[in-house]
């Protein structure tokens, strides 16, 4: 179903605002993304309340630390019952492997569904010049994204978050079962806000995206339910 592919970004900083969106949108979308803003303002309680109301949660905390610390934190997040968590691929193979196995182990011990563990590759705010001259990484952004996607796959992660323009290369490199999540999605004719390189839902789906993260085109629409339904129709179309 098209709506399973749609993740709404809850970029708000109070539980009340988040739950108002969840109550309205839960029947029409697949998941809600809780980012650092909401999580640091309202904590695990916000996540628990969203799940209690029938919303699935992508907890977008982009963890990056030594293997033990990230793996132990991933265990805590697994117990919360979230559906997706993410970590930085630049944390390296050992960090990603430790996290993937901690999540499986914790889920088995607690008898819960393990969340998908997803890697963040090159932040879309980085361009090739910054990659080459500041981080001293050779090659293009796309090459680095593909390199890290393969490393994430080797570590046993489920997939990556990336920009829409990298979907095709990652799909080719990592195969059809690899999860690809992209923000930067704008239906035709909608305000692009501060997003630069955008793609429509239909284009991203054609390239093989697994999940689309959409924030303001839904949350700031006059009719949020209609905006979500229109995107789902485009995904299915
Ligand atoms: O409102 P909008 O649709 O632009 O929201 C996109 C969401 O995806 C936001 O939560 C934003 O932080 C996140 N995101 C992004 N670009 C990235 C990584 C995350 O827009 N490269």
Image (tube, rainbow, N blue to C red):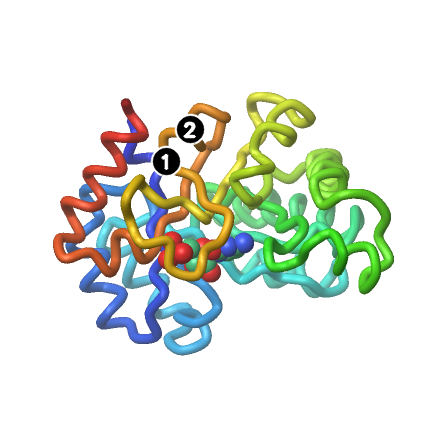
Residue 176, x across and y down, in percent: 56, 21
Is residue 32 visible from the viewing direction of this image?
no
- Residue at the image point whose x is 23% and y is 56% from the top: 22
Residue 53, x across and y down, in percent: 22, 55
Specify whether 197 is left or right of 2. Answer: right
Most distant residue in the front direction: 189
Specify whether 133 is left or right of 153. Answer: right
- In the depicted view, which residue is nearer to us: 207 or 16? 207
Kindly identify which residue carries mark 1: 201
Does 30 sit above or below residue 88?
above
- Residue at the image point whose x is 68% and y is 55% from the top: 127
Residue 208, x across and y down, in percent: 49, 26
Residue 57, x across and y down, in percent: 38, 52
Q: Quadrant of ligand 1?
A: bottom left
Badge 1: how crowded within 10 Å, few (<14), some, or many (20+)?
A: many
Could you say which quadrant of the image residue 39 lies in? Answer: bottom left
Element type where label 1 sits in the image? helix
Specify whether 83 is left or right of 232. Answer: right
Question: Which numbered disc covers residue 205?
Answer: 2
Could you say which quadrant of the image residue 204 lies in? Answer: top left
- Residue at the image point whose x is 29% and y is 58% from the top: 50
Figure quadrant of the N terminus: top left
Q: Are marks 1 and 2 in contact (CB under 8 Å)?
A: yes
Element type where label 2 sits in the image? helix
Badge 2: how crowded within 10 Å, few (<14), some, or many (20+)?
A: many
User: Is label 1's Cβ within 8 Å of ligand 1?
Assistant: no
Is residue 122 visible from the viewing direction of this image?
yes
């Amino acid at each position: 179903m098209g709506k399973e592919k749609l993740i709404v970004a809850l970029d708000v900083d109070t539980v009340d605002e988040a739950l108002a969106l969840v109550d309205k949108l839960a029947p029409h979308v697949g998941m809600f993304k809780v980012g650092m803003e909401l999580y640091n303002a309202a904590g695990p309680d916000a996540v628990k309340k969203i799940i209690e109301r029938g919303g699935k949660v992508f907890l977008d905390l982009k963890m990056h630390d030594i293997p033990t610390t990230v793996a132990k934190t991933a265990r805590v997040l697994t117990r919360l019952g979230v559906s997706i968590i993410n970590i930085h691929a630049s944390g390296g193979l050992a960090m990603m492997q430790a996290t993937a196995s901690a999540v499986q182990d914790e889920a088995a011990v607690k008898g819960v569904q393990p969340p998908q563990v997803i890697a963040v590759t090159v932040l879309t705010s980085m361009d090739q010049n910054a990659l080459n001259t500041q981080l001293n990484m050779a090659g293009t952004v796309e090459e680095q994204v593909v390199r890290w996607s393969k490393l994430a796959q080797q570590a046993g992660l489920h997939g990556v978050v990336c920009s829409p323009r990298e979907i095709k290369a990652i799909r080719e490199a990592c195969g059809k079962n690899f999860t690809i999540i992209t923000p930067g999605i704008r239906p035709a004719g909608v305000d692009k806000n501060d997003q630069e390189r955008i793609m429509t839902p239909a284009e991203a789906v054609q390239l093989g995206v697994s999940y689309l993260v959409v924030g303001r085109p839904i949350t700031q629409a006059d009719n949020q339910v209609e905006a979500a339904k229109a995107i789902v129709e485009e995904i299915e179309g």
